[in-house]
Amino acid sequence: MTNFYGLKPHISEKSFTLSAMGKYVFLVSKDANKVTVKDAIEKLFKVNVTKVNMICIPGKLKRSKSGIGKRKDVVKAVVTLKKGERIDLFETEEAKDEKKDKKADKKDINKDKAPTPEGRGSDQSIGKAK
């Protein structure tokens, strides 16, 4: 069984702008390294990874009434894919709208091809008196 090192997509404004350039951001566990992240992404999403950058973000100290606490440390992996490949998890709203428009166009084309039932408003029965 393969270990995917707590691989979770990181959803933010910056990650969506990076996804347009073929770079995707994931949160990974502290013990993950570039090679393991690359292998995990390639196996999960069936894409070719060209580059992996790791960012270690230490947790902030936070003060409250009960004392001082610390947020947990976070490791981000910025994964660059081969040109032309993409991961559908990070699909932008514009791409979703384009897909909806394409589906609507296909439905309109199918409506034009639909035959009219005979005897109900067909062209043959209009204007003829019996």
Image (tube, grey):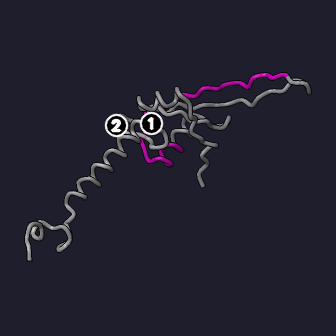
Residue 45 colored in magenta in the image: yes
For the residue pair 117 and 80, the one nearer the viewer reads as 117
Q: Is residue 100 left or right of residue 9?
A: left
Mark 2 to mark 1 CA distance (whole Å) = 16 Å
- Residue 119 percent coordinates (x, y): 17, 74
Q: Few, some or many C-alpha atoms within 10 Å of disc 1 (few <14, some 14-19, many ≥20)?
A: few
The answer to whether 122 appears left or right of 31 in the picture is: left
Give the number of the mark in front: 2 or 1: 1
Number of residues whose C-alpha sits closer than 10 Å to that of mark 2, classed few (under 14), some (14–19) or many (20 or more): few
Q: Which residues are magenta?
A: 40-63
Q: Which quadrant of the rendered structure holds the C terminus?
A: bottom left
Tally of marks: 2
Residue at position x 37%, y 46% from top? 100
**Above-or-below relation of 10 to 43:** above
Farthest right residue in view? 66
123 or 15, nearer to the observer: 123
Can you identify the residue that label 2 sits on? 84
Tell which residue pokes out farthest to the bottom in this image: 130
- Could you tell me which residue is drawn at 64 percent across and 43 percent down? 6
Q: Residue at x 39, y 40 (%)?
A: 97
Which type of secondary structure does the marked residue at label 1 adopt?
loop
